[in-house]
Image: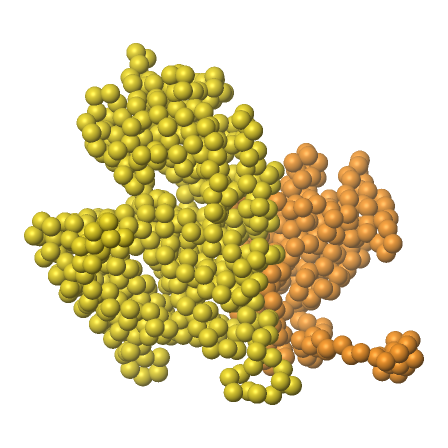
Chain colours: A orange, B yellow
Amino acid sequence: MKILVPVKRVVDYNVKVRVKADGSGVETANVKMSMNPFDEIAVEEAVRLKEKGVAEEVVVVSMGVSQCQETIRTALAMGGDRGILVETDDELEPLAVAKMLKGLAEKESPDMVILGKQAIDDDANQTGQMFAALMGWGQGTFASEVDIQDGSIQVTREIDGGAETVKLKLPAVVTTDLRLNEPRYAKLPNIMKAKKKQLDTLSPADLGVDTTPRLKTVKVAEPPKRQGGIKVADVAELVDKLKNEAKVI
Amino acid sequence: MNSPIVNRRDLDFLLYELLDTERLTERERYAEHSRETFDAAIETAHRVAVDYLQPHNRKADLNEPTFDGDKVSTIPEVKEALDVYCDTGLLAAGQDFERGGMQLPATVAQTCTAITKGANVGTFAYVGLTVAATNLILAHGSDEQIQRYTPYMLSGRFFGTMCLTEPQAGSSLGDLRTRAVPQDDGSYRIRGNKVFISGGDHELAENIVHMVLARTPDAPAGVRGISLFIVPKYLVNDDGSLGPRNDVKLAGLIHKMGYRGTTSTMLNFGENDECTGYLVGQPGDGLKCMFHMMNEARIGVGLGAVMLGYGGYLHSLAYARERRQGRAPGEKDPATPQRLLVEHADVRRMLLAQKSYVEGGLALGLYGARLVDDERTHPDAAARANATRQLALLTPVIKSWPSDYCLRANDLAIQILGGYGYTREYPVEQYFRDNRLNPIHEGTHGIQAQDLLGRKVRQEGGTAFDTMVATMRATVDEVNHDGPGSLAGEAEALARALEALEETTRALRAVGETGDTERYLANASDYLDMFGHIVIAWLWLRQAATAAAAQPASDDDRAFYQGKLAACRYFMNVELPKIHHLAALLRRGEDTPLNTDPDWL
């Protein structure tokens, strides 16, 4: 089977993000960028399926600026076979990404698309679901276990209060949660091998997708600074404050 | 509690803005590389460091290896981390593609190892020694020896050691006594005792390949009689499997101040007269072989010292930004909130000193690694020869200056944390203890000073020295001397220091020419100190010029470049003037130590 793994280039999880002075977004100039950690888990799972002989080919896809090539190369160094970059300087929203994935899925005919449940920059948690809906495929989101069977796939999902196991017909979409696996490091010799792997570049127009944002960012702000605590005299005062100041009871 | 190992922004600045490492990809050997592959390798090193090495740094310090008379035990995290390190290919990072390496430039390979040292120098040492031993066999071993040992060393199945020191021969290597007697089959019987052998015994790899210096029976006295031997813990069969146990016995472990994760051993070779060794290179060439590898090993020591200093700097900086203590001088109102430590000028002084030492030291180490790359791969023969000369001259400085000043940085980090810094709850005291080894091993501070003044400065009639001074002077002329971003004051300070260096060196060489070598070298350590400070000042001026010309991409970036300018100013105003005192004492031939009778002490 063929697996398609979409990966996103995001601000590295170790970086303390800062909001731009004009409130238009977060600072990304000269900031360390990496693969979205949930997508790393997706790449790892796909590569493991390949190593088990379940998958024949792992195709890694990214969308965005030309530097997304680096992110794809990282995935190829982890064991992906080839890459596709849909290059654009536009800001991409989940719907546009899902539409472009649809275009790619129609070209590539994968049996499975596995991607992170969300990206750590916008935390949207939408792309996988939108893409599955556009394709009319089944979706196993928040996967903590994936088991391929004959023509179908069993996905254990992390849900509130426990786990749910669903069985999906292939082709299907899986989005990864943290417990699915522990991604490997890019081994040094594989970094060199990745350089020689095929990496094609397309444009959104090639896929017939209009990426114009449907949303407008009004303002981006830092979370409010944590205020110091206060001491209350008695329970009555506490209840009063919870009721009238904090308005939580 | 973990703190950042290095400022990645600084690393990028040094590698790509100051040293233009990307241009190395124009060279044939690195043609398949790009900044992308360099960064990917550094990223892998950093992740292995953070995920596997750093977490047990303290635990390994508190739980030294033990010896039950039969086997050495280490905490399990050490082997786990080393297995991951080898598996990711970091051990072979700089080796040829054909040997399974990544063929990284020395500049990038040294960056990768520096990061792992910063995370856990005690665990790193095992693989560091293995790389050194492997390089020794690759450079001087026979094809048969290369085949028998190096593939397994590069994969991490075998580890390596360097066995030089003996109880009576430390700095005085020429006095070593281990004997090697030729056998009919071409091998040698080794007999002798070695001490302070790091990684000399353990169960972390299947086998240990000792590189042993010893004397053949008819060898002349002194260094010319020393030969190099491979002495494996287990003999290795033709198919790579292990043969019988060799007669190398662990006599005991040494209990150290720092670097406690690394076994330091006393080894007995040939207690039963059954220790087999194999000659590497020609008889009598042992030290020559060893020193061929020394430049890189010494850059490694210097960078290790830098990284321990760097860790302390970043930890004390984070602490100073969080910890509130005291009020502004003159503020008498106890109701006002306390100030952050970093708001006190005296604390900023200690942070600036650390910053100027560790970032200056990192620039020096990476510059040295770049010279290794230029020596090996520069397309122009004259440039290669120049790199060789410059590297030879600077190696004692690259090893010693960080070992001295980044240890001082650790001292300041402890000071900033105060009583907490003195406890084992914070990492800064361990950085200090670990770093205290660096002025001692791989040639002590004093030995490096003698190497610099006794040999390197005088080599080829002083060509390397003159070239180095000319290189530094060119920077003085190149930097911006007026208008905004002017570095005229800093450049002037370096120019004056260079004059003092030339004058002092001339005066000393006149003493040397009288043949009174003892007098010539009596203050060699001060000369090393002076020389090192000037080279660091030069690298700070270059960093400042780069920072002043840069276009900051954000507020953080602007602050980063301002930090470079401030550290340069600090070094030029506060540190560099110290060389004029050293110059004066060197020029007058300060002779108190020379003339002090040992009985008076």
A95 shown above or below A141: below
Q: Quadrant of residue B285?
A: top left
**Quick check: can you spot residue B159?**
no
**Quick check: can you spot residue B50?**
yes
Residue B254: x and y in percent read 46, 37
Residue B221: x and y in percent read 20, 29
In the picture as drawn, the residue positioned furthest to the top comes out as: B184
| Tally of numbered tags | 0
> Horizontal placement of B230 versus A81: left or right?
left
Which residue is at 57% across, 58% downward?
B423
Name the one closer to the observer, B481 or A127: B481
Residue B468: x and y in percent read 22, 59
Which residue is at 47% across, 52% downward?
B433
Which residue is at 34% across, 51% downward?
B399
Residue A62: x and y in percent read 62, 56
Name the one closer to the observer, B325 or B351: B325
B473 shown above or below B375: below
Q: Quadrant of residue B509?
A: bottom left
Q: Quadrant of residue B68?
A: top right
Name the one closer to the observer, A83 or B266: B266
In the picture as drawn, the residue positioned furthest to the left comes out as: B514
A22 shown above or below B10: below
Which residue is at 51% across, 56% downward?
B429
